[in-house]
Image (cartoon, rainbow, N blue to C red):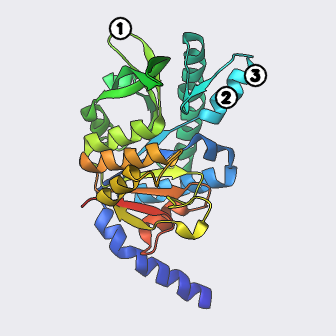
Amino acid sequence: MINAKKRVQNLIESLPYIMEFRGKTFVIKFGGSIMKNEAAKEAFIQDIVLMEHLGINIVIVHGGGPHISNRLEMLNIKSEFIDGLRVTTKEVMQEVEMVLSGMINKELTMGINNGGTLAIGISGKDGNFIKTKRKVIEKNGETIDLGFVGEVDEVNEQFLTDIIEKGYLPVVAPIGFDQAYNTYNINADYVASAISASIKAEKLILLTDVDGLYLDFNDKESLLSSFTTKEGEDMIEKGIIQGGMLPKLQCAIDAIKSGTHNVHMINGSREHGLLLEVFTAEGIGTMIKGE
C-alpha cells in the first residue's frame, strides 16, 4: 500500500510538468558512449516513447565516437585527435558515415519504432537539412585543417518541422554537407545546439556520462543543480569550467541565446534519468536557464 501511494504521489507531482510541456519540443543529444549500456539505452527509449505519448515533440541527435573508433581499429585505419576532434580523412569519413548513418542511426530508430512510436532516421544530407562548412582550429599560431570535420552553417528547420508535424520523431545522425558535395562529420553536441536554436526548442537536453556540471569535477558535492547563462559565461571567463564540459557549456549558452528556453545536462547512464529530470521538481542533473 505504501508503494502504491508513493507511485500515485509521483504521478500527481508530474502533472504540472506534463501540462506545461504538452505540445512543446525537446531536442535530446544521446551520446554514443551510452549506447554500450543496454539497460540505459532501453530505459532511454521507454522515456522517449512515454514523453511522445504525453504530447511532447522529441528530436534526437546521436553521437557515436566509441563505435567509430572500434570500426577504424578493426580496419587498421589510423585516427588521431587534436583538441578532442578527430582528424578525418576521406577514408575515415566513409567509415564515420557508415557507422553513424548506417548502423547507430538505424538501430536507435528501430528501437524507438519497436517501443511504440514512429521514428524516422535522417542525417544532415537529407532534405538539405544541415549545410556545413569546414572546421579549422588555431593552435600555437598555426591554422590546422582537420579534414572532413565540419561545423553547422545553416539548418533547414522547415524540413524538420514538416517531419514533426506529420507525426514522426526525427533521429538525426550528425553528418553534414557543403555545396561542393563534400560530406562532413560534426560534433553531435553542436548539431543538437544548432537544431535547438533553429526551432527555438523548449529544452535542449545533453545526455552525458557524468551527473552534470561540477565546479570541481573531483568534488562530487560541487555539482551545480542550476545556473543562468550569465553565471555560465562568468565561469568560462574565470577558467572554472574546463576539459570536455567546456564545449558542452558553450553549446548550452549559444542555444539559449538563440531562443532555446532551458538546457539540461544529465547522466544518460542513469535509468529513466530523462523522466526524473523533466517531471520532478528536484531533477537529477544541471539546468542552465536564460536570464
Q: Nearer the viewer, residue 191 or 142?
A: 142
> Above or below — where is 175 with respect to 192?
above
The answer to which quarter of the image holds residue 270 is bottom right
In the displayed structure, 97 sits above or below 218; it is: above
CA–CA distance between discs 1 and 2? 27 Å
Give the residue displayed 37% in from the left and 42% down from the top: 193
The percent position of residue 25, horizontal first and vertical second, equals 32, 51
> Cβ–Cβ below 8 Å for labels 1 and 3?
no
Please indicate, yes or no, whether residue 118 appears anywhere in the rendered image.
no
Which dot marks residue 180? 1
Relative to residue 78, is residue 119 drawn left or right?
Answer: left
The kind of residue tagged 2 is Ser
| Residue at 58% in and 35% down | 64
Residue 208 at what x, y percent from top left?
55, 50
- The quarter of the displayed image where residue 110 is located: top right
Residue 53 rendering spot, x and y as whole percentages = 41, 58
Number of residues whose C-alpha sits closer than 10 Å to that of mark 3, classed few (under 14), some (14–19) or many (20 or more): few
* Mark 2 vs 3, N-terminal side: 2
Decide: few, some or many residues near mark 1? Use Cα within 10 Å; few <14, some 14-19, many ≥20: few
Residue receiving disc 3? 74
